[in-house]
Every structure is written in C-alpha cells, then in structure tokens.
Image: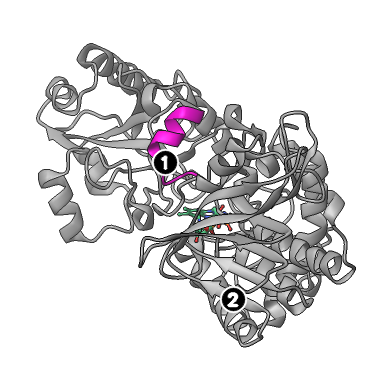
C-alpha cells in the first residue's frame, strides 16, 4: 500500500527545508523531494546576506528599526516595482527569522548588523551574514532536517526530480506530482492535497533566461537552478510575472570563455565605498557608459543594463597596475599570472589601439575615450563627473579585463497571493498549489532592483510560515 502524504514539498533548498520541517513538526505527513544528491540548494554557494528589522542584535546595539522602516526602504530601493503586499508580509517575518537563527547558534559575523554597499544600501544597519555565508545557514538547517527526519511523518527523497504536476477537477487544481528517480530512471505518481514549489529560480538555465529575459546569462547560480518548477506550473496555467524586471549585479568575470559561469568567489572589487576605481569602464564601442565611482550601485547596474550583452571592460595602464589597490583582491599571484597569460577576458597590449583590437573593443572609440578621460584628469574635471581621478591612462602596457552584469537570482517567477497560493492567468488561486523562495520570482520582493537580503531571508521566513500554515490546515481537515 503506497504511503499517504498531506503535503509534497518540491526542492530541499533554502525555502523547502524549513517548510518541510515546520509542516512535519505541525503534524502533517510530508514528502520532501530533491533532484540533486544533497539538500541545501543555493545555500551551498550563496553569500546569504540576510535582512531583518527589530532584531535582538539590533536592540543590543541600540539600533532603532522596525518592519515599517524595512518596508519603506525596500519600496524606495525597488522604486515601488516590488509586490508591496508580499514585501509587507516578508518584513514582518524577516526579523523573527534572524532571531530564530540566532537562537539555534547561528555563526553570525561579528560585524552584523551593518549597512553594505554591494547592493543599494539600506538606511539602517539591518544586513546580517554568517561567517561562512550560506554554509553557516546550512549548519543550522541540516541538523534540524536530520532531527525532523527521525519523525515518521517526514520523508526526504534525494535524486528525485519532479517532472510534472498532477492536475485534477474541472477547475484545475493540483493533486500531486509525477517524479523521476535519477537512480532507476523510473517515473511514479505521488498524490497529496497540497504541493509546495520550492524549486528556486532559473539562474542555471541559459535557455529559460534567454526566453524570459532575452539576454545572455552570466551566472553564479548552480546548475540545479533549472526553473523547472516554474515551467511545470506554467504548463498547468500558472501566471509567470517579473520577466520585465531584470537588473544584473555589478559585475563579474566569466570562468571559461563561453561558459556563462562567473568566478563568484573572486569577484572584482568595484564598490567605490570599498575601493575607489582607478580604471575606466568602456562598452564594446569603446565609450564610457557610467561614472565609475558613482556611489549608487543601482545607477551602475541600470547603466550596464543598456549595454549590449551586459558586457564591459575595465581599462587601465601600467601605472594603475603597479600602484592601485588590487581590483581583483581574491586572486593569487599565480591565478593572475595564468589569467593574463591565457584567459580571453584578460588582455594586454603595447598600445591602446592594439588593446582594443585584441580585446574586441572599437579602437577609435577606445582611443577617443581615453584621450578625453586623460584630459579630464589634467584639468580635474571629468566629463562623467567622476571624482576619483588618480592618474591618466597613458603608460604601456595597457590592460583590459572583460566583465559582465551577473545573475545571482532571477527576476521572473510564479505569481502568488499573500497566502502564497499560486495564481492562474485570471488571478485566481490554483487549488492545492503553493510557491515560496525564488520560484515566486526574485523581482517579487526586489522589483527591478536588488533589495539586500530579500531572497534568503524571505525564503526561510515564507518556508517556515507556509509549513506551519499548511500543517494547521491539514490538522483542521481543510480541503
Ligand atoms: C552566488 C550567489 C550569491 C547570493 N547571495 C545572496 C545574498 O547574499 N542574499 C540573498 O538574499 N540572496 C542571495 N542569493 C540568492 C539566494 O541565495 C537564492 O535566491 C535563494 O537561496 C533561493 O532559495 P530557494 O529555496 O528558492 O532555492 P534553492 O535554495 O536553490 O533550492 C531549490 C531546490 O530545488 C531543487 N529543485 C529544483 N527543481 C526541482 C525539481 N523539478 N524536482 C526536485 N527538486 C528540484 C534544487 O535542486 C534545489 O535544491 C545569492 C545567489 C547566488 C547564486
């Protein structure tokens, strides 16, 4: 006799693990399905900077904050392009989620809470991160998952991919999933009254990114971010929203040429609050496209969004190479030497014209740009209003490093209401189907911006909230 489940959670990642644990603790019979061979999802690579207001850590430091201020900041940063109702729900849950992590011995970096500038800054210190990024979060979640798996009412199946949703009834609705066991290759149908899609975004799927966002993908997401859950729901009538709200993160270097994967752990230091730029940033036509030291990263990201293929070069000379603080601080001398020797994104040349030819930049555009930049250095008035003018770019050899706007989370996802029920094209809930985490679209809580911490924290928070809510429904016998 097949086992019976009240709830199937698809995806054992940031949102799915807390959802499954909380639902099982509430007494629901839960099946947690994960396509890969380990739970944890994007937390294995995510920086997992989180945000939350009115936390015990803030109070201990005398920082006055509350969810209303967090909400206002999120709306300001997103320029009102986020889903205000869901942001309101998230900010109420985020602070308690930080406190919950701390109560479980979370390895918080002592600098937290802080104001960071890698994404557009909050007005109040409310960003938190573990000393080991997402792995610090996993060190809390995985032991909890192990404990919960000791209960008879929670089952985890790894290497099990959901390949379809079982639709029922004249009004649609979901009655379970079709899954494929990666070991045997066999497919199977498993029924349950509720299915939660916690399948993450599509940052590992260049074809889906091209379909929804019309751009090449330079990504730091793991290949498990297939977007499959979004597509499965779309196939039964769910509404996908947010594709028009893309904003890339500024910026990264491609690993292997043509791979579309970026060197995540060695990001270039492009935050002027940390390291004022010594380089000039140029587009493929050799033009500058932004004031390199503009404090707002949002302004740099929006300018990059207008450039072909989200690609630009940081151009500099021997003087900068010898005297500037490192632009690539994570790289060892050996890694740098190898990169300058053979990585196609790293170019050197004795003249600017030759640099342009080798790198693939328009030569006339680049030489005119550098002449103009050097003239600005001489008179102390930069055409783009740049304030940091350390030296002209004139001493060979010249260097260029090709960079790209990168994807940490994808904007489009399943439209949900405040109960996290997936909505169809008419805005009606699809019975039995829920979504949490990046599957609801990175833009839902960030709009066409990057609101710091508004992926990991709400993924955890919505996971815990929905797990508890669905367990209550199951206990109450609600349909
Ligand atoms: C390098 C990097 C840095 C980041 N830094 C930050 C940050 O500092 N702060 C922040 O807030 N956000 C950050 N993000 C984004 C954030 O980490 C993610 O948005 C979030 O972790 C996603 O959580 P999730 O639960 O939706 O998905 P995931 O954690 O990716 O979990 C989804 C799980 O579902 C599984 N799955 C998918 N499809 C199926 C299927 N069909 N069947 C079975 N299983 C399936 C996947 O294998 C995966 O394990 C970063 C992302 C990256 C890549």
Residue 397 is at least partly visible in this image: no
Give residue 54's mark. Answer: none
Check the image and name the residue furthest to the front. Answer: 1
Q: How is the image coloured?
A: one colour
For the point 45% across and 25% down, which residue is it?
Answer: 214
- Tell me the SS state at disc 2: strand
Query: Which of the image's four quarters has the C terminus?
Result: bottom right
According to the image, label 2 marks what residue?
155
Front one among 435 and 119: 435
Task: Identify the mark nearer the N-term, 2 or 1.
Answer: 2
For the point 65% across and 58% down, which residue is it?
Answer: 459
Please state the extent of the stretch shown in magenta in the rendering: 201-212
User: Which quadrant of the structure image shows residue 364?
Assistant: top left
For the point 59% across and 68% down, which residue is it?
Answer: 32
Report how far apart the C-alphas of labels 2 and 1 lie in the structure: 40 Å
Residue 205: in magenta span:
yes
User: Which quadrant of the structure image shows residue 425?
Assistant: top right
Front one among 432 and 419: 432
Give residue 375's position: percent from left, percent from top.
Answer: 34, 18
For label 2, count other residues whose C-alpha is less than 10 Å away and answer few (under 14), some (14-19) or many (20+): some
Front one among 371 and 246: 246
For the point 45% across and 65% down, which residue is it?
Answer: 44
Residue 382 is at least partly visible in this image: yes
Residue 197: in magenta span:
no
Q: In this view, does 154 lie above or below 446?
A: below
Front one among 478 and 440: 478
According to the image, label 1 marks what residue?
251
Give residue 395's position: percent from left, percent from top.
Answer: 17, 32
Q: In this view, does 238 lie above or below 178?
A: above
Q: Locate residue 372 relative to residue 21 in the image: left or right.
A: left
């Amino acid at each position: 006799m097949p086992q019976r489940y009240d709830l199937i959670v698809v995806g054992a990642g940031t949102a799915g693990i807390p959802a499954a644990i909380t639902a099982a603790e509430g007494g629901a019979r839960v099946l947690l399905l994960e396509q890969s061979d380990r739970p944890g999802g994007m937390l294995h690579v995510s920086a997992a900077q989180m945000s939350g207001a009115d936390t015990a850590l803030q109070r201990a430091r005398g920082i006055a904050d509350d969810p209303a201020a967090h909400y206002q900041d999120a709306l300001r940063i997103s320029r009102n392009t986020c889903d205000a109702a869901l942001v309101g729900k998230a900010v109420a849950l985020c602070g308690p989620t930080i406190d919950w992590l701390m109560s479980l011995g979370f390895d918080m970096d002592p600098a937290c809470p802080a104001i960071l500038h890698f994404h557009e800054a909050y007005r109040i210190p409310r960003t938190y991160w573990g000393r080991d990024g997402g792995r610090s979060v996993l060190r809390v979640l995985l032991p909890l998952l192990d404990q919960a798996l000791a209960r008879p009412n929670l089952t985890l199946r790894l290497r099990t991919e959901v390949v379809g949703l079982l639709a029922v009834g004249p009004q649609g609705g979901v009655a379970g999933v079709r899954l494929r066991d990666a070991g045997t290759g066999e497919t199977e149908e498993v029924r349950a009254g509720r299915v939660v899609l916690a399948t993450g975004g599509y940052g590992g799927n260049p074809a889906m990114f091209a379909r929804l966002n019309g751009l090449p993908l330079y990504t730091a997401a793991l290949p498990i971010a297939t977007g499959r859950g979004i597509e499965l729901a779309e196939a039964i009538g769910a509404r996908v929203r947010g594709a028009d709200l893309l904003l890339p993160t500024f910026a990264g270097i491609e690993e292997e040429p043509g791979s579309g994967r970026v060197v995540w752990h060695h990001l270039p230091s492009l935050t002027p609050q940390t390291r004022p730029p010594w380089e000039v940033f140029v587009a493929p036509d050799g033009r500058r496209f932004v004031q390199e030291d503009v404090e707002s990263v949002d302004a740099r990201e929006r300018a990059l969004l207008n450039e072909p293929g989200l690609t630009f070069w940081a151009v500099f000379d021997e003087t900068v190479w010898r005297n500037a603080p490192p632009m690539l601080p994570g790289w060892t001398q050996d890694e740098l030497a190898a990169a300058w020797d053979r990585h196609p994104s790293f170019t050197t040349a004795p003249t600017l014209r030759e640099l342009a030819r080798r790198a693939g930049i328009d030569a006339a555009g680049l030489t005119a740009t550098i002449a103009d930049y050097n003239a600005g250095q001489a008179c102390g008035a930069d055409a783009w209003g740049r304030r940091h003018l350390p030296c002209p770019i004139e001493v060979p050899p010249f260097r260029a490093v090709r960079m790209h706007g990168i994807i940490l989370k994808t904007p489009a996802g399943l439209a949900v209401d405040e109960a996290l029920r997936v909505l169809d094209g008419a805005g009606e809930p699809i019975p039995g189907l829920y979504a949490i985490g990046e599957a609801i679209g990175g833009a839902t809580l960030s709009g066409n911006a990057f609101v710091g911490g508004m992926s990991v924290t709400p993924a955890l928070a919505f996971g815990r909230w929905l797990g508890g809510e669905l367990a209550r429904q199951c206990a109450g016998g609600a349909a």
